Amino acid sequence: MTLFQRRIIYVSYLPLGARQPPPLAELRASGELGSLEAHDVVLRSEDNTYLQGYVFGRRSAEAAATRGRSASVLEFPSPVLIYFQGNAGNMLHRLPVFERMLAHAPAGTRVVAVHTRGYGGSGGRPTEKGLRRDARAILAYVGQAFPDQPVVLYGHSLGGAVAVQLAADTAAAGVAERRINGLMLENTFTSMQDLVTAIFPRWLPYAWLARFVLLDRWETEHTLQRMAGALPATLLLVGERDELIPACMSARLAAALGNASATSATPAASASPAANDVTMPTGLYRFPHGLHENTYLQPRYSVVVGQFLRDCAMAAGRGVQAV
């Protein structure tokens, strides 16, 4: 396991066929894009690795319906959400996730979903150093393609670790034209060492060995503690029944940010679908029945994500950070 640890961490080859995503034209013809419109994106990472991905938005009819329900049209620029996926599959496996994300998002919101190296149609092999390079290249692309729009990072599981490192790298560099306006972390771990300790039984030596041989450490909690004051508004989404990453890790990440406040999506709160009945500041939002891969299906998910995007976009329009 020590020799093949990256094959265990970065499961880009599963499910079968994940490294050969079908063309968008095929998905349009089959109706698999649902309410989404999409176009292809190709770019190069900092070390010239080929990266492939997509930009998603809502179809014109659905977007028009959203504008009709919104009282804040044109009051702020439409946000761009950069999505970093978990450790398996490809972006097209997450089409239902993107539909839910955009269901209550501000009109004109775009989701930029580019495969980091070793995933989907991108080249290279995944490593922590490589994924961090790719994330910076994706942010640079967004800065060029959407120069006047607020940018929010979203990371699920491993993708949350990538998003945190990108936010920290950007804050440390102090590059104004690449400002990040918000950060969302869904079911993210505190560190790879902690995750190894949580997953494997105590009688196995892997947690002890990981201290010495782990190649990619993804120190998310430490990074948040170190950079908390320089990071943008951050929202943690946690499925409390996550069967892979203990929910307590999200609570630790919130504490690392200096914000342990939490809100739960209770059945009573889920009754109203209106997008303007939630105010979601930086903090922790709990979904009591959420698992590792289905938190996006939980009641209130779309509303909470949409409101956070709206808050970040409105704050960016005023020249301040969301709080």
Image: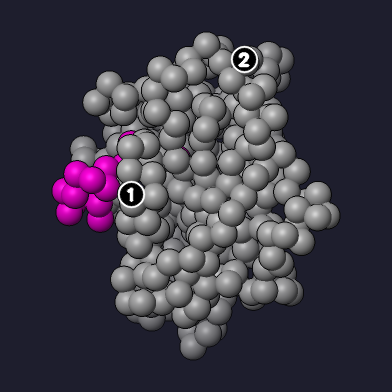
Residue 220 is situated, as x and y percent measured from the top left of the image, at 36, 54
Q: Secondary structure at mark 2?
A: helix
Residue in the image at 63% along x and 29% along y: 63
Name the N-terminal-most of marks 1 and 2. Answer: 2
Residue 173 colored magenta? yes
Residue in the image at 52% along x and 27% along y: 106
Q: Does residue 256 lie above or below 278 as drawn? A: below
Residue range in magenta is 169-184
Residue 307 is situated, as x and y percent measured from the top left of the image, at 50, 24
State the residue lying farthest toward the right: 30
Q: Please tell me how crowded label 1 is: few (under 14), some (14-19), or many (20+) other residues with Cα within 10 Å.
A: some
| Residue 171 in view | no
Instruction: Tell me where residue 192 sits by quadrant.
Output: bottom left
Instruction: Tell me where residue 101 sits by quadrant.
Output: top right
Residue in the image at 46% along x and 48% along y: 82
Give the residue type that dot 1 points to: Gly
Q: Residue at label 1?
A: 143
Residue 208 colored magenta? no
Q: Secondary structure at mark 1?
A: helix
Q: Does residue 72 lie above or below 98 as drawn? A: above
- Asked whether the residues under the numbered discs 1 and 2 touch, taking CB atoms below 8 Å apart as contact, a structural biologist would say no
Q: Residue at label 2?
A: 69
The quadrant the C terminus occupies is top left
Q: Which mark is residue 304?
A: none
